Image (cartoon, rainbow, N blue to C red):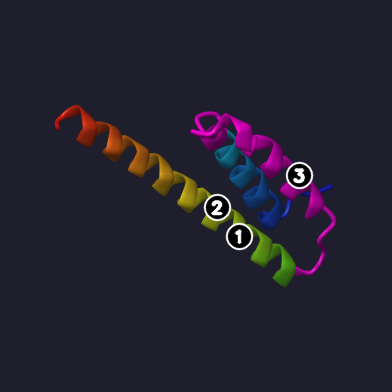
Amino acid sequence: MAATPARLRAIHLYKELHRLGREYPDPSYDFNGRMRRLFEKNRELKDPEDIERALKLGEYIKNETMALYSLKKYRHLKRTYE
């Protein structure tokens, strides 16, 4: 089975989200478990438009999570210097 560009993008995105999920601030949210279920749910997608839509959603989640971490760090620094 040849790896398609969309498959490689999905694997790369999953790995990035998994790394981000290690430091998720709320342990009760189960970030990595939710991401795994989301990827498993979309495993059988065949239509390129649906695949692209799912990848864009994953990118959006990644960007929002990174923004959350930046905000967390900013708030910590702000409290430190007050």
Whether the magenta-drawn stretch holds residue 29 is answered as yes
Label 1 is placed on what type of residue? Leu
Q: Which residues are magenta?
A: 19-48
Label 3 is placed on what type of residue? Arg
Q: Quadrant of the C terminus?
A: top left
Spot occupied by residue 68 in the image (x, y as percentages of width and height): 42, 45
Whether the magenta-drawn stretch holds residue 53 is answered as no
Label 2 is placed on what type of residue? Ile
Q: Secondary structure at mark 2?
A: helix
Q: Residue at x 60, y 44 (%)?
A: 12
- Residue 38 shown left or right of residue 23 in the figure: right
Mark 1–mark 2 CB contact (< 8 Å): yes
- Residue 21 shown left or right of residue 34 in the figure: left
Q: Which residue is mark 3?
A: 37
**Would you call the spot at circle 3 few (<14 residues within 10 Å), some (14-19), or many (20 or more)?**
few
Q: Earlier in the sequence, mark 1 or mark 3?
A: 3
Q: Residue at x 56, y 35 (%)?
A: 21
- Mark 3 to mark 2: distance in Å? 14 Å
**Would you call the spot at circle 2 few (<14 residues within 10 Å), some (14-19), or many (20 or more)?**
some
- Mark 1 to mark 2: distance in Å? 6 Å
Q: Secondary structure at mark 3?
A: helix
- Mark 1 to mark 3: distance in Å? 14 Å
Spot occupied by residue 39 in the image (x, y as percentages of width and height): 73, 48
Q: Which residue is mark 2?
A: 61
Q: Residue at x 76, y 44 (%)?
A: 37
Residue 57 is marked as 1
Q: Earlier in the sequence, mark 3 or mark 2?
A: 3
Q: Residue at x 60, y 54 (%)?
A: 58
